[in-house]
Amino acid sequence: MSAKVANSETPGTAAEQRELVITAGRHLRLTLLGIFLILLVYALYFARDFFMPVVLAFLLALTLTPIVRFLRKRGVPSALSATLLVIVSAVTLTGIGYMMSGPVMELVADAPNIGRELRERLAEIRRPLDRVLKASEQLDQVAETARDPNLQKVVVAQPGIISRAAGNLLSAGTTMAITFVLSLFVLASGTMFYEKIIQSFATLSDKKRALRIVYDVEREISRYLFTVALINSCLGIAVGFGLWLLGMPNPLVWGVAAALLNFLPYIGALTTIVLVAVISLVTFDNLGFALLPPLYVLCCNIAEGQFVTPLILGRRLELNAVAIFIAVAFWSWLWGFVGALIAVPLLVVIKVFCDNFESLRHVGNFLGAQQIAEEEEEEESAPAT
């Protein structure tokens, strides 16, 4: 009787041990994944001089891939089309940067005057706040007198603005050179990456599935990046031309700013409107006419965000607003202004990649807009009912 009881308890004990082993393995995988993510963030932060041009090169290559694919179908070699596209992109960006350098430097040099004139225009609004400002100044004076008079201040000399500008210009030039050269090699390689991916799988079915996923991901991402870049360029042209008609100074600067900042949903458009409003208030004496340029920029962004982009791209790649703000904050902390610009394209890359794998589809569902996720769930549940 005791032998039967022991035998009946053994399977239960073995099942519990297997469950413990599975649980421990799951915890170990999660721990290793967390360690890997922390090390990856540290690597991206401290080695940003290497990773930033590499990521920019792949994004540029994906943006230009539809044109290379279109020309390849018409008999133009990938190496030739890639070389021409990269040269045209480099010359265009360099020319725009050179034309913008003068007006931007003038705006930076004239920033104190702009601030003084803006304060004068907003003097009526600031008058109720004068008491608060005076109170804060009195508190500062009291704090200064309460300090130890024998205490000495140590001021660390900072590098001059010219040396910092020269260093930033050299770093930006190096990054752009690596970006264009690497994107040229990626575009000119053609199907080499696909062949390498296929060779890494053993069975024919796995090769077909991997090739289909890679083609789908590459096609969706390249179509999105190319279309968004084209839409933002058209938005910049419309903003610059309209502000030129309204008599705004430096319309080229505001057109380029609108095109670049539009890669930042919500934040970019708001930044452009505020900057245009500040310069408009300083430039025009008539307050009613000074409101026309920011209102025009607002109308252009509303037309682009609510009509043009959804009509051309559809609603499948719309992103969760919370995920957008988290991505912009993370990448701006990691890589500064460049990281903020590429945050949303990278988020779209991650979403498209996750949507094509069943095990990661819940991540893609989280990154997508709530309305889109509900529509997909209704479409999936419709045949069952």
Image (tube, helix red, strand yellow):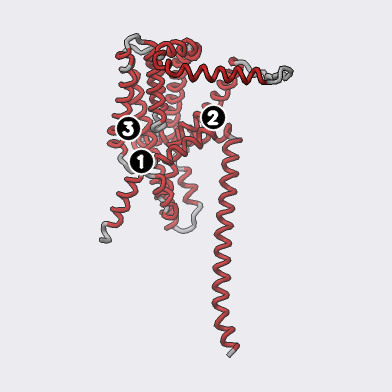
Secondary structure beneath dot 2 equals helix
Measured in 3D between alpha carbons, the distance from the residue under mark 1 to the one under mark 2, in whole angstroms, is 31 Å
Tag 2 residue: 178
- Residue 88 at what x, y percent from top left? 42, 24
Is 222 situated above or below 17? Answer: above
Q: Residue at x 52, y 30 (%)?
A: 336
- Residue located 55% across and 20% down the image: 169
- In this view, the mark in front (2 or 3): 3
| Residue 68 in picture, x, y percent from top left | 39, 34
Q: Which residue is pictured at 60% across the width and 88% down the height?
A: 2
Label 2 to label 3, Cα distance in Å?
33 Å
Q: In 3D space, how far apart are the residues under numbered discs 3 and 1 (Cα atoms)?
A: 11 Å
Q: Quadrant of residue 152?
A: top right
Q: Nearer the viewer, residue 379 or 133?
A: 133
Q: Earlier in the sequence, mark 3 or mark 1?
A: 3
Dot 2 or dot 3, earlier in sequence: 2
Mark 3: secondary structure: helix
Regarding mark 1 in the picture, which secondary structure is present there?
A: loop
Residue 318: numbered disc: 1
Q: Which one is nearer the viewer's eye here, 306 or 47?
A: 306
Name the residue type under label 2. Answer: Ile
Q: Amino acid at mark 1?
A: Glu
Which three-letter amino acid code belongs to the residue tagged 3?
Gly
- 1 or 2: tag closer to the N-terminus: 2
Q: Is residue 30 above or below residue 84?
A: below
Looking at the image, is mark 1 or mark 2 nearer the viewer? 1
Residue 48, how many percent across, how many down? 57, 34
Q: Provide the residue designation for mark 3.
A: 305
How many other residues sit within 10 Å of disc 3, few (<14), some (14-19) or many (≥20)? Answer: some
- Front in this rendered view, residue 49 or 322: 322
Residue 294 lies in what quarter of the image?
top left
